[in-house]
Image: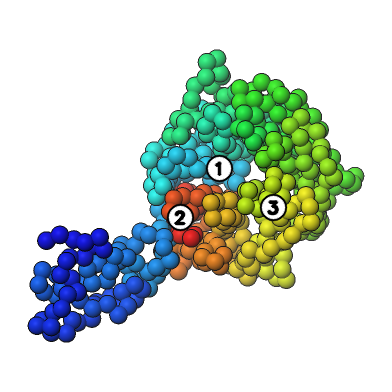
């Protein structure tokens, strides 16, 4: 018996008056609503399959098509999976992700002296872990002296990381080229720690890095802070080739606008016109409000145009993104995703057209009484945002482990949707203040989050694959 293109037998659904009226199928929700048993091999199906339910039916739903394909009352359900057990729990500066050919790479600093690069396929199934040796100058801080980014360069993926010295007196930045599977690409004469991009007499490990539009140069920025100083009084930057050869020597990029303020929360991004943009928060220690300062730089790291400033609440948690050609030219498409107060709640919003007439658009009002820690990604379908809504466990407990939350994302039509794996709150560590977000294939998105338990003490990297049509 041959099957037609719809996946049903030739005689399915033909005149079967002699067989009596077809009975309703077992499943009655989703695409199965109203389905009756089809004729297969001269008889009605004893148990309904796609012959009765139609070509869109799946016994286990895998499609991201806006339909309840398995007829269980849930449309396009997310899937959760455990990716890896983690050692020391990484804060947002010690983990990053990058979309690569046929999957995603995640780099995490959770062990001394190595970066672990985890390879995931397009279903977010782990394919293996590669350990890449790195330089960690201050192991007494349990890796808090390290920060990292995964970058897409003209020579493929690259691991950028910086490490601060034990006395808070200098910071080094390195770059290690990787292949699409996360393995190191060795270069002749390159030290094991990677190409040295800068070695500067400052103590800030929380550096930021971005690549140029052509992918051939790395822009790195850092503050002149120390173990005893909150924030920094100067923001420095440098531009190098992928091999560490200097293009622009380290120079001061920005200083506070007032004597009683400091610079904090630095982010950088390459612009499509070949320049760069820097976003930094300026605040007074202990203040509830501050300024977001935005400045363009050319490919010689000289300032271009007037600096833009935006009032902000303390700790606004910002992300620089480029919305792409659909949003306009190289100066119209950069945007800032941030959180801010709205009464007793918090709102996630995006500021666009940053160098013109700035516009603001609310993305989501987040869960009342909880703090959203979010990730943002610009995809072929536009801006995507997902977040952990965190709160403190009222039962108390260890201050590092008393956090709880749920996972949310913008779903179909930009509507916030709770995609947590069950009714219980996720057990979180204080460092679980991040979401790594990447576009997958066929309208799927992938997110990485960390869950933690105190007894037994364990930290787990979790993957969430969800539909965002």
Q: Which label was assigned to residue 96?
A: 1
Q: Image check: 460 left or right of 202?
A: left
Q: Secondary structure at mark 3?
A: strand
Q: How far across and down, in percent of the image, does residue 141 sit?
A: 62, 37
Q: How far across and down, in percent of the image, does residue 310 sit?
A: 80, 55
Mark 3: few/some/many CA within 10 Å (<14, 14-19, 20+): many
Who is closer to the viewer here, 204 or 266? Answer: 266
Which residue is farthest bottom? 21
Q: What count of labels does the image hold?
A: 3
Who is closer to the viewer here, 431 or 107? Answer: 107
Mark 1: few/some/many CA within 10 Å (<14, 14-19, 20+): many
Q: Which label was assigned to residue 191?
A: none
149 versus 196 height, above or below? below
Which residue has dot 3 on it?
Answer: 336
Q: Secondary structure at mark 2?
A: strand
Q: Is residue 315 visible?
A: no
Sooner in the amino-acid sequence: mark 2 or mark 3 = 3
Q: Image check: 72 left or right of 227?
A: left
Sooner in the amino-acid sequence: mark 1 or mark 2 = 1
Q: Secondary structure at mark 1?
A: strand
User: Of discs 1 and 2, which sits in the foreground?
Assistant: 2
Which residue has dot 2 on it?
Answer: 444
For the residues bearing labels 3 and 1, Cβ distance under 8 angstroms: no
């Amino acid at each position: 018996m041959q099957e037609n293109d719809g996946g049903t037998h030739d005689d399915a659904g033909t005149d079967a008056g002699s067989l009596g009226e077809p009975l309703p199928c077992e499943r009655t929700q989703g695409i199965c609503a109203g389905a009756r048993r089809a004729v297969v091999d001269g008889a009605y199906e004893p148990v309904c399959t796609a012959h009765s339910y139609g070509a869109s039916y799946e016994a286990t739903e895998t499609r991201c098509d806006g339909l309840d394909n398995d007829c269980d009352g849930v449309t396009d359900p997310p899937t959760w999976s455990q990716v890896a057990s983690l050692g020391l729990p990484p804060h947002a500066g010690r983990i990053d992700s990058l979309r690569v050919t046929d999957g995603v790479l995640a780099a995490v600093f959770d062990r001394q002296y190595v970066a672990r690069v985890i390879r995931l396929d397009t279903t977010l199934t782990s394919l293996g872990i590669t350990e890449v040796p790195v330089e960690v100058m201050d192991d007494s801080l349990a890796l808090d002296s390290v920060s990292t980014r995964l970058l897409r360069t003209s020579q493929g993926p690259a691991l950028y990381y910086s490490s601060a010295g034990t006395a808070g007196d200098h910071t080094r930045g390195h770059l290690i080229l990787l292949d699409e599977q996360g393995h190191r690409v060795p270069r002749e004469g390159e030290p094991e720690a990677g190409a040295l991009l800068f070695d500067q007499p400052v103590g800030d490990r929380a550096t930021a890095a971005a690549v140029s539009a052509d992918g051939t140069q790395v822009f790195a920025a850092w503050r002149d802070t120390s173990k005893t100083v909150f924030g920094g009084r100067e923001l420095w930057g440098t531009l190098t080739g992928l091999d560490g050869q200097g293009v622009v020597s380290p120079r001061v990029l920005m200083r506070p606008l007032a004597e009683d303020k400091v610079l904090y929360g630095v982010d950088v991004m390459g612009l499509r016109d070949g320049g760069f943009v820097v976003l930094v928060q300026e605040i007074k220690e202990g203040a509830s409000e501050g300024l977001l300062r935005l400045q363009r730089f050319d490919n010689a790291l000289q300032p271009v145009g007037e600096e833009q400033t935006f009032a902000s609440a303390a700790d606004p948690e910002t992300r620089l993104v480029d919305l792409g050609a659909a949003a306009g030219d190289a100066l119209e498409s950069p945007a800032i995703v941030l959180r801010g107060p709205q009464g007793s709640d918090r709102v996630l919003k995006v500021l666009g057209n940053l160098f013109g007439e700035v516009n603001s658009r609310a993305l989501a009002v987040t869960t009342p009484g909880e703090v959203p820690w979010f990730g943002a990604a610009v995809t072929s379908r536009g801006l995507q945002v997902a977040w952990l809504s965190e709160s403190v466990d009222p039962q108390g407990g260890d201050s590092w482990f008393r956090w709880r939350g749920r996972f949310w994302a913008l779903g179909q039509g930009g509507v916030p949707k709770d995609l947590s794996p069950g009714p219980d709150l996720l057990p979180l560590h204080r460092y679980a203040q991040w979401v790594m977000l990447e576009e997958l294939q066929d309208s799927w998105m992938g997110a990485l989050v960390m869950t933690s338990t105190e007894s037994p003490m364990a930290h787990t990297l979790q993957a969430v694959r969800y539909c965002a049509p």
